[in-house]
Image (spheres, grey):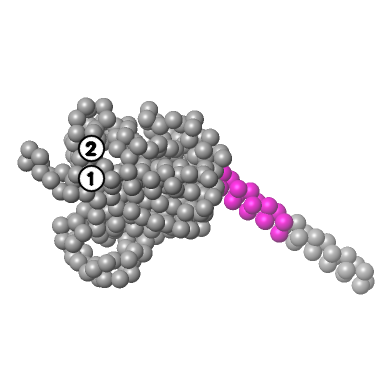
Amino acid sequence: MKKRKDKHYRKRRRKWLWITLSIVLLAGIGVSVYLFTIYNNVKSTVDNEIHETVTGIDHEATKKKVEEEEPINVLLLGVDERENDKGRSDTMIVMTLDPAKERMQMVSIPRDTRTEIVGRDMDDKINHAYAFGGSDMSVNTVENFLDIELDYYLRMNMEGLGQLVDAVGGITVENEFAFDYGGKSFSEGEIELNGEEALAWVRMRYDDPEGDAGRNERQRQVIQGVIDQGANINAVNKIGNIMDVLGNNVATNMKFEDMRNLATNYRASRKDVSSYQMSGNGTTIDNIYYLQVPESEVEKTNEMIREYSSSS
């Protein structure tokens, strides 16, 4: 009688074992299918909606650099788009990633900087390059101005930057002084920002003692905050929101494989981040305000970028 009970017990246990294994297997398949779907959606968004080639960048040379994990230069353009107007690149940052030395440098170019606009045969504010010729002209003009080679560019509508802050769950920044702007109040010290607050925080200019330089520093902090938060996101369901924002507001010459390689092989560059704001002297020409950046400042900035870009 006892043997029959033991035999029955073993059958029941095997039955539940198979049910449990089946559930685990099905769950695993479901997760795999879900992750594969997300992977395909992300790849499709990047390659079909975000990707935009530029003629001024040698893509084969960049590809080789990334494969060999050499330092790369990325131009970040923050564009204030307007109705019936392409807009101007109010934010121009050259970001250098050095994975071997685990460091990153962000150099801000003041938007009023007077320089040659490549392709227009004229001198004008550097942020007008985008209005005249889009990302291509911006890339060519920055390369000519600083005498450097850019490997990637990334253009974002400033409204999209606020949406991206929300998509990553908000950011934390260090505010140098208390101020009010756009109906928002910002206290001095470490503060947390949502997307709407982040936009107001970076747009304030005239009440900043540092003027455009102060605003550029806040912009760098927001970009850094988004990078840090995005790199630390573990919740898969946030990826869809992030890709929606990027698809609607971003253009870059990166393809999905490029982004994946950067995320994998250049991740350590976030460990040591430094920033620099180019400076110059304000001047008025034909009743238009410009910032004249002396050649010595351009050479200094060129050396800084080249030092970070050196693989030795």
Looking at numbered disc 2 in the image, what kind of residue is underneath it? Thr
Looking at numbered disc 1 in the image, what kind of residue is underneath it? Val
- Toward the viewer: 256 or 179? 179
Q: Where on the picture, by quarter, is residue 179?
A: bottom left
User: Tag 2, which secondary structure?
Assistant: strand
Looking at the image, tell me whether mark 2 or mark 1 is earlier in sequence order: 2
Q: Nearer the viewer, mark 2 or mark 1?
A: 1
Q: Which residue is mark 1?
A: 293
- Toward the viewer: 138 or 40? 138
Q: Residue furthest left?
A: 287
* Residue at screen point 52% across, 49% down: 99
Dot 2 and dot 1 residues touching (CB under 8 Å): yes
Label 2, label 1: how far apart the Cα atoms are: 9 Å
> Mark 1, residues whose alpha carbon is within 10 Å: few (<14), some, or many (≥20)?
some
Where residue 248 sits in the image (x, y, percent)?
34, 42
Quadrant location, the N terminus: bottom right
Q: Which residue is mark 2?
A: 115
Residue 245 inside the magenta-drawn segment: no
Where residue 149 sits in the image (x, y, percent)?
40, 36
Which range of residues does the magenta coloring cover?
20-40
Residue 24 inside the magenta-drawn segment: yes
Q: Where on the picture, by quarter, is residue 142?
A: top left
> Mark 2, residues whose alpha carbon is within 10 Å: few (<14), some, or many (≥20)?
many
* Res. 147 visible in picture: yes
Q: Is residue 23 left or right of residue 135?
A: right
* Residue at screen point 79% across, 64% down: 13
* Residue at screen point 72% across, 56% down: 21
Q: Is residue 245 above or below residue 5?
A: above
